[in-house]
């Protein structure tokens, strides 16, 4: 080994053994005149910034403008109308504080709901027949229909087509296309009748006419009762 190799090998070994030696060597005693002092404890300062307490503000006797009113939004959940319903809900709650907005699903008619329950059964039966029809039909003692042989000729394409077609049909049967808005049980806007979604300004005005009008009447009645009690 030449000097360069000895230096490259010896220097790491020297540093390694020196570190090990320092672990077992006791620390040197402190020098004369050197004293250690404990850290002084911080003196607590008085809190000069005390929170100011104000008397709680009382709400007016009539309460928020939307208090006591309920708006129901019945929409088609399978039509992806939930985002529109949530947007309308947030808008109404900000425009009419205290109003109660309820979101609910608007179900399709009864015949469509019944057919929607039948479609998954048909889907499963067709796929099982394509996959294991050669064993099922002989055990049942039934002659396979002609459509079975045409579907069995290409199993993958037949299964994929059946899956997509039945899912599309089931989605259509479960959709109602509704976006109905009710205020205190009264129909305010109907997408089934108008064939469009309501605008935010339009819906705000429709709800405002019913909320503000009834609120004004309640305010007059409350003032009359208070005046009679005062007398």
Image (spheres, helix red, strand yellow):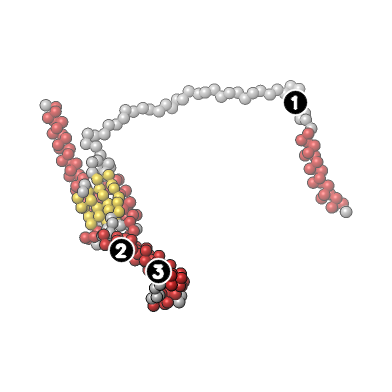
**Residue 153: which disc?**
none
Residues 230 and 180: in front is 180
What secondary structure is found at the residue carrying circle 3? helix
Q: Quadrant of residue 231?
A: top left
Side of 188 relative to 171 (left or right): left
Residue 212, can we see it?
yes
Earlier in the chain: of badge 2 and badge 3, it is 2
Using the numbered discs, state the Cα–Cα distance from disc 2 to disc 1 in whole angstroms. 93 Å
Q: Which residue is drawn at 34% across and 58% down?
A: 78
Q: Callout 2: 10 Å neighbours few (<14), some, many (20+)?
A: some
**Are discs 2 and 3 less than 8 Å apart at CB?**
no
Q: Image point 81% across, 45% down: which residue?
A: 13
Classify the position of the N terminus by image quarter.
bottom right
Q: What label does residue 126 carry, if any? A: 3
Instruction: Give the image location of residue 110, x and y in percent.
Output: 26, 59
Circle 2 residue: 115
C-alpha distance separating marks 2 and 3:
16 Å
In the rendered image, is residue 177 in sight?
Answer: no
Tell me where residue 182 appears, x and y as whole percent.
23, 51
Residue visible at 76% across and 35% down in the picture: 23
Task: Report the residue at 78% width, 38% height from top.
Answer: 20
Q: Is mark 2 on a helix, strand or loop?
A: helix
Pinpoint residue 90: horizontal percent, then vertical percent. 32, 48
Q: Position of 83 compared to 228: left or right?
A: right
The residue that mark 1 highlights is 30
Q: How many marks?
A: 3
* Foreground residue among 147 and 88: 147
Query: Does residue 61 lie above or below 161 as drawn?
Result: above
């Amino acid at each position: 080994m030449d000097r360069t190799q000895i230096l490259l090998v010896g220097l790491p070994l020297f540093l390694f053994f020196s570190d090990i030696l320092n672990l077992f060597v006791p620390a040197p005693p402190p020098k004369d005149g050197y004293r250690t002092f404990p850290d002084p404890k911080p003196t607590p300062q008085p809190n000069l910034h005390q929170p100011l307490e104000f008397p709680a503000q009382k709400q007016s006797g009539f309460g928020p403008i939307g208090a006591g009113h309920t708006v129901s939004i019945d929409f088609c959940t399978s039509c992806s109308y939930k985002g529109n319903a949530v947007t309308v809900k947030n808008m109404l709650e900000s425009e009419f504080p205290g109003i109660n907005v309820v979101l609910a699903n608007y179900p399709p008619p009864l015949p469509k709901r019944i057919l929607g329950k039948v479609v998954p059964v048909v889907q499963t039966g067709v796929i099982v027949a394509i996959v294991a029809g050669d064993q099922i039909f002989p055990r049942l003692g039934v002659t396979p229909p002609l459509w079975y042989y045409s579907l069995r000729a290409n199993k993958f394409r037949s299964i994929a087509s059946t899956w997509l077609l039945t899912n599309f049909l089931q989605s259509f049967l479960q959709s109602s296309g509704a976006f109905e808005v009710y205020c205190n049980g009264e129909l305010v806007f109907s997408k089934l009748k108008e064939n469009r979604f309501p605008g935010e300004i339009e819906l705000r005005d429709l709800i405002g006419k019913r909320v503000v009008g009834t609120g004004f009447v309640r305010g007059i009645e409350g003032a009359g009762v208070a005046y009679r009690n005062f007398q």
